[in-house]
Image (cartoon, rainbow, N blue to C red):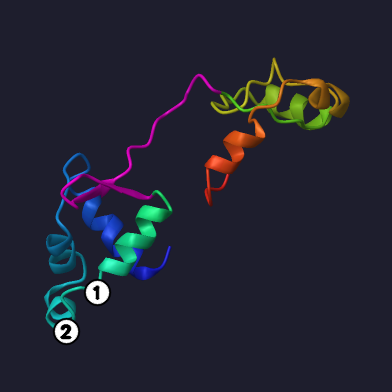
Amino acid sequence: MDADQTAITQFLKQSPDEFVSRKEICRRAGGKWRFREDEFWAVPVLTRMREERIIESDDTGHFRLVKQTKNSGNKQRVWMSPAIRSMLKSSGQNFATIDLDKEPETAAQMASAKPLLKQADFLTQGNTTI
């Protein structure tokens, strides 16, 4: 994220469930001097953020941050060496994203397991990192 995207994101975090107009974003996210120099400075940034699915817009052209869903029940399967697994288990820590008891023991077991994402799911996610 560049500085403009960060400024817009920080402004939209103040009211996460409300749609905000383009003019209001231009006026408040960059400060009054930036708005006086160019009233439409945020338009290309908002377009880029909408393409990257960081923000969403409604029918009237107002914007808000995309709501993040928490999938606590969707734990990711990760292969790790048995030595690392035993060290993590013996530490007594709770690792919320990794279920140490149900993880595959070998790389062959990991390869035979059902894939987490289908290729179509991966292609629809665009530029997001997994």
What secondary structure is marked by label 2? helix
At x 17%, y 60%, the residue is: 22
Residue 60 position, x and y percent, is 15, 49
Which class describes the residues within 10 Å of circle 2: few (<14), some (14-19), or many (20+)? few
Question: Which amino acid, by three-letter code, is at mark 1?
Answer: Trp
**Above or below: residue 111 compared with residue 19:** above
Q: Is residue 80 magenta?
A: no
Residue 53 position, x and y percent, is 40, 48
Q: Say which of 3 and 18 sits in front.
A: 18
Question: Which amino acid, by three-letter code, is at mark 2?
Answer: Glu
What secondary structure is marked by label 1? loop
Which class describes the residues within 10 Å of circle 1: few (<14), some (14-19), or many (20+)? some
Q: Is residue 120 left or right of residue 103?
A: left
- Residue ID for mark 1: 41
At x 56%, y 48%, the residue is: 129
Residue 27 position, x and y percent, is 13, 68
Q: Which mark is residue 92?
A: none
Q: Are marks 2 and 1 in contact (CB under 8 Å)?
A: yes
Name the quadrant of the C terminus.
Answer: top right
Q: Is residue 95 visible?
A: yes
**Above or below: residue 66 compared with residue 90:** below
* In the image, farthest residue toward the top: 101
At x 52%, y 48%, the residue is: 128
Q: Which mark is residue 37?
A: 2
Residue 122, image quadrant: top right
Q: Which residues are magenta?
A: 54-74
Q: CA distance from mark 2 to mark 1?
A: 9 Å
